[in-house]
Image (cartoon, helix red, strand yellow):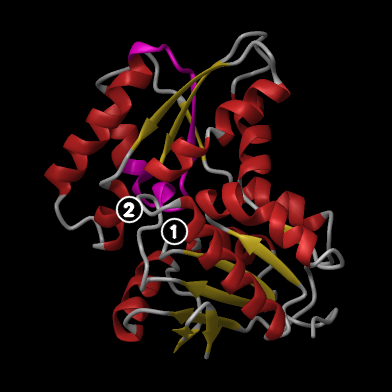
């Protein structure tokens, strides 16, 4: 069962959600965290939405069973497909996602314009849900939203951005429609994408008259979580589980989490249940 002293559960399809883990630990270095990377199924972006919903609800149920006092869906497509269901299933548990905080951060980045031109870089699945245009237009009726699906970015980031020239080409390709649309703010609509932010900014410098504001929702997610539970207490225990190769994931996490201490373990799918 969940309890007030349990860890904060965070999950994503791979290393992307570590951007949220890093933001949490930056502000609350003593927080206890339990992270799940579903690398057996990464990337989620090209999968059927019903399948992604099943993965997301299965991981959420596991985190609840493992004693987490809150769950963060650090995954855009999971948030779009499963957040409402999981909140309904666990009404007494704080469950938060990416989309709401990202929309608020994007509108702030757009500077309060009446008709802001906002771009969204996301996976194919997140684009297919239409969640970002719907939420942005609900929050700001004049918003002009341009979405671009980026199917190659997650695999390139999971591979450690080892092919800089290919990464540069893909970033330019995905940003070009947003330049044509005159976007002044761009939502990084996948938690993997901030890990390629330097590449995106470099590509944008050659496409935009002024480099747009890239919106990483990680800090906004922490802001939302602050309003739900106390975050300051803990023993700074960071446990990372992967459904893939623990050795590979430990090396990946070491790169993206810098010098932070963590312990890596395994989780396995048994049907629709996640076990460790």
Residue closer to the observer: 108 or 77: 77
Above or below: residue 195 compared with residue 249: above
Where disc 2 sits, the SS reads: helix
Q: Which comes before the other along the chain, label 2 or label 1?
A: 1
Q: Which mark is residue 154?
A: 2
Crowd rating for badge 1 (residues with CA inside 10 Å; few <14, some 14–19, many 20+): many
List x then y, in percent, for residue 111. 64, 18
User: What range is drawn magenta here?
Assistant: 180-198
Above or below: residue 85 compared with residue 169: below
**Residue shown at the point (62%, 55%) measured from the top left:** 82
The answer to whether residue 212 shows anywhere in this view is: yes
Where disc 1 sits, the SS reads: loop
Q: Is residue 89 left or right of residue 217?
A: right
Residue 185 covered by magenta stretch: yes
**Residue shown at the point (36%, 63%) measured from the top left:** 42
Above or below: residue 75 compared with residue 113: below
Residue 51 covered by magenta stretch: no
List x then y, in percent, for residue 71. 69, 67
**Residue shown at the point (45%, 17%) measured from the top left:** 183
Decide: marks 2, 1 in contact (CB < 8 A)?
yes
Q: Is residue 27 left or right of residue 46?
A: right
Residue closer to the observer: 173 or 112: 173
List x then y, in percent, for residue 146. 45, 21
Crowd rating for badge 2 (residues with CA inside 10 Å; few <14, some 14–19, many 20+): many
Residue closer to the observer: 115 or 58: 58
Q: Is residue 106 left or right of residue 222?
A: left
**Residue shown at the point (35%, 77%) measured from the top left:** 249
What residue is shown with label 1?
16
Between the residue at mark 2 and the residue at mark 1, the CA separation in whole angstroms equals 8 Å
The answer to whether residue 123 shows anywhere in this view is: no
């Amino acid at each position: 069962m969940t309890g007030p002293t349990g860890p904060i559960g965070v999950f994503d399809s791979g290393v992307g959600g570590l951007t949220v883990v890093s933001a949490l630990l930056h502000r609350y270095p003593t927080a206890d965290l339990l992270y799940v990377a579903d690398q057996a199924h990464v990337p989620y972006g090209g999968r059927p939405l019903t399948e992604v919903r099943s993965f997301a609800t299965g991981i959420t149920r596991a985190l609840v069973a493992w004693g987490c006092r809150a769950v963060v869906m650090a995954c855009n497509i999971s948030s779009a497909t499963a957040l409402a269901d999981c909140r309904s299933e666990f009404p007494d548990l704080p469950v938060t996602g990416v989309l709401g905080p990202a929309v608020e951060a994007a509108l702030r980045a757009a500077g309060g314009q009446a008709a802001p031109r906002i771009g969204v870089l996301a996976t194919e699945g997140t684009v297919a849900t239409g969640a970002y245009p719907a939420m942005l237009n609900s929050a700001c009726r004049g918003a002009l939203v341009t979405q671009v699906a980026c199917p190659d970015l997650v695999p390139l980031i999971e591979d450690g951005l080892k092919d800089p020239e290919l990464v540069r080409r893909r970033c330019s390709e995905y940003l070009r429609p947003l330049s044509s649309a005159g976007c002044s703010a761009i939502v990084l609509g996948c938690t993997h994408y901030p890990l390629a932010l330097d590449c995106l900014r470099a590509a944008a410098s050659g496409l935009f008259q002024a480099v747009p504001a890239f919106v990483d929702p990680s800090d906004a997610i922490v802001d939302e979580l602050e309003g739900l539970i106390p975050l300051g207490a803990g023993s700074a225990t960071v446990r990372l589980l992967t459904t893939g190769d623990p050795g590979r994931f430990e090396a990946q996490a070491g790169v993206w989490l810098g010098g932070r201490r963590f312990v890596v373990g395994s989780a396995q799918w048994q049907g629709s249940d996640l076990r460790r």
